[in-house]
Amino acid sequence: MAYLQKATSIEEFDAYYIMKSEPAAVNWSGYAAPPNREKLREHFAHVLENPDIFFFFLQDEESGEKMGYSQLNREGTSMLFASFCLLRKFQNAGLARTLIALSLEKAKEIGVIRMNGWISEKNYASMRGFRSFGMNATGATKSVHMEAFDRDDIYHEYELYF
């Protein structure tokens, strides 16, 4: 089993850096290379200090190992599913669904009435996952430049009202 644990210390940065540096995470970030360690550390410190950003690690109940993360950004009465990641070695075991489900529960606990997220039209797995939890496309789109591929990808907004 797995649970979400709120990140509270810069000491947890190394786990985050490892996740953000995996090839699949770099690919979906749109950058050509893993993140700059110091810049990402500054970002992580900002995330920990911001009362409207909720950063959770998905952890194994038995070992405590960090398997993934989700970042939820409160925007008034809405919560943006800003980012999530699952380490490659934990993929294809149903844990992405667990991560999404637990993140939605946390958003409800925090008290927002709407959850939304932006997903690349090329990220079929995430679109299926979000839809399986009742999140629907709003029709809103935005173009995001993917530096690694020198192209623009279209992102679609998905939302769910609690």
Image (cartoon, helix red, strand yellow):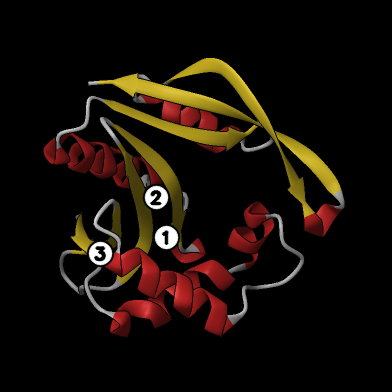
Seen from the viewer's position, the closer of residues 61 and 28 is 28
Asked if marks 2 and 1 touch (Cβ < 8 Å), the reply is yes
Q: Secondary structure at mark 2?
A: loop
What amino acid does circle 1 point to?
A: Phe
Q: Give the residue at mark 3.
A: 59
- The amino acid type, in three-letter code, at marker 2 is Ala
Q: Which mark is residue 90?
A: 1
Q: Quadrant of the N terminus?
A: bottom left
Q: Which residue is mark 2?
A: 93
Give the CA distance from mark 1 to mark 3.
11 Å
For marks 1 and 3, give the one nearer the viewer.
3
Q: In the image, 100: left or right of 151?
A: left
Q: CA distance from mark 2 to mark 1?
A: 6 Å
**Rendered view: 117 above or below 57:** above
- The answer to whether 68 is drawn above or below residue 10 in the figure is above
Residue at position x 76%, y 50% in the image: 146
